[in-house]
Amino acid sequence: MKKLFILFILFFITYLFPLDLQFFREDLSFEIKGDHFYVDGLYYFRNISDKELKQRLIYPFPQDSAYGKIDSLFVINVRDSTITTNMQYKDKGASFTIQIEPDSMAVYRIGYRQELKGKKAEYILTTTQTWGRPFEQVNYTLTFPRELSLDSLSYIPDSLREESNRYIFFWYKENFMPDRNFEIHYSKKEK
C-alpha cells in the first residue's frame, strides 16, 4: 500500500510539474512598508522539450493568523508585457497558466501586497522542492524601515546597505534548494 501511495505521489508531481518544464531562477524584492509586506519578482522558466508547453502553476500564499488579505496581485509575461488574464486566486494561493515556446525560456513578473497583522512576514520557498531540482541562482533583497527592529531572519543575508531611513539586505545563492521559508520577524523600536 505504501509503494502504491509513493507511485501515486510521483505520478501527481510529474503531472503537475512535467520534466520538460524547469523553474530555475528567481530574483525577488521584498519590502515591509507600514502594515504591509510587498513581494515583486522575476520568475524564470525553461522548456527543454521540442514542443510548446502550456502549464497551470499554483502560487501559494503563507497561512498564519499574523497575515491578512493579499491584494494587488499581478502576473506579467515579461517577453511581451502581457498581463495574465487567466489568473484565479483565493486566500491560500493563486493559479495561472504559463506558455513557453519549444527549447526556450520565459520570464514572468509576479507581485502582490499582503496585510501584516502581527510582527512577521513570510514568503513560501519550500515548494521549490516539488520541482525536484534546486534553483540555479536566486537574488533576493529585503527593504526594511529603520524605525523597526529586526528580530530574526530565516536566512542570513550576504550583505547590507544602510540608508537614511531604511536598510536593504541582499542574498545571492547558487544551486539553492530551500529547506525553510523566507521569514522576517520584527518589532517596533522603543523611543
Image: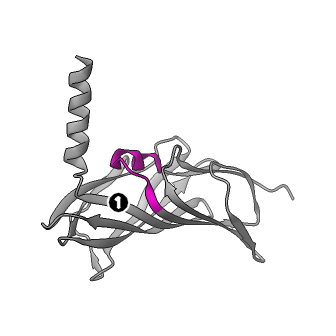
| Magenta highlight on residue 59 | no
The one of 108 and 4 positioned closer to us in this rendering: 4
The residue furthest right is 191
Q: Measuring from the top left, give residue 150's x and y in whole percent.
A: 73, 55
Side of 109 relative to 87 (left or right): right
Residue name at image x 78 percent, y 77 percent: 164
Q: How many marks?
A: 1
Q: Quadrant of the C terminus?
A: bottom right
The amino acid type, in three-letter code, at marker 1 is Phe
Residue name at image x 23 percent, y 48 percent: 16
Residue 55 visible, this angle: yes
Residue name at image x 45 percent, y 61 percent: 136
Q: Relative to residue 90, is residue 113 depicted above or below?
A: below
The residue furthest top is 1
- Residue of label 1: 23
**What SS does tag 1 mark?**
strand
The quadrant holding residue 139 is bottom right
The residue furthest left is 51
Q: Measuring from the top left, give residue 110's x and y in whole percent.
A: 39, 67
The one of 168 and 51 positioned closer to us in this rendering: 51
Residue 88 visible, this angle: no
The one of 57 and 61 positioned closer to us in this rendering: 57
Q: Measuring from the top left, give residue 140's x and y in whole percent.
A: 56, 65
Q: Which residues are magenta?
A: 125-136
| Magenta highlight on residue 126 | yes
Q: Quadrant of the N terminus?
A: top left
